[in-house]
Amino acid sequence: MNKSKLKLAFVILFFAAFLVIYFNSTKQLFGNDKESITRVINSIEGYENNSIEILKILDFRDSRIVAFLSNNSPGYIQFYKNKDGNYKWQHIEVRDNETFSTFNTDLPALCLLLTVKI
């Protein structure tokens, strides 16, 4: 094989490896806005087909608490801000068949009691 064919084969192999890695990597979802929060909730096992209505978004330093309804049941999801400034989910809780629920969040250095009602 001559040198130019060897270079071309190397470039093609490198490009193919890049494509395989790029398309096989998981696409991380973040809760940076209302629409992406809904997508995050619907991506969590058990919530895939639920109807989600965002009620309130509360930000505290590097944490975000979102009150929502999941199929008309009250719930909340908690996010933390990662080093890139994106909100990654860490906890979700929904109380099925209730119209009024109180949740005890675990925010560091902040005692927050969240009440969600229909």
Image (cartoon, helix red, strand yellow):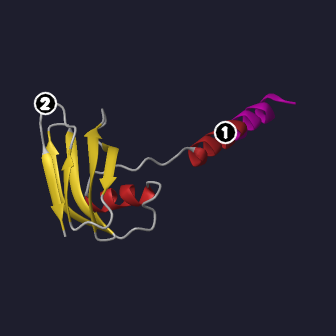
First-in-chain label (2 vs 1): 1
Q: At 78% across and 31% down in the image, what residue appears?
A: 6
Instruction: Return the residue nearer the eye: 93 or 8.
Output: 93
Q: Is residue 62 visible?
A: yes
Answer whether labels 2 and 1 touch (C-beta < 8 Å).
no
Q: What is the three-letter code of the residue carrying label 2?
A: Ala
Circle 1 packing at 10 Å, graded few (<14), some (14-19), many (20+), is few
Question: Against 93, is 1 above or below?
Answer: above
**Residue shown at the point (25%, 56%) measured from the top left:** 33
Magenta span:
1-12
Q: Which residue in the structure is indicated by mark 1?
A: 17
Q: Give the image quarter of residue 85.
A: top left
Camera-side residue of 56 and 103: 103
Disc 2 is placed on an element classified as loop
* 18 relative to 107 in the view: left or right: right
Q: Circle 2 is placed at which residue position?
A: 109
The structure residue drawn at horizontal position 21% and vertical position 43%, both measured from the top left corner, is 105
- The residue positioned 52% from the left and 46% from the top of the image is 26
Residue 96 screen position, x and y as percent:
33, 63
**Location of residue 101 by image quarter:** bottom left
In the rendering, at what x and y percent does residue 31 appear? 30, 51
What is the C-alpha distance between the residues marked 2 and 1? 46 Å
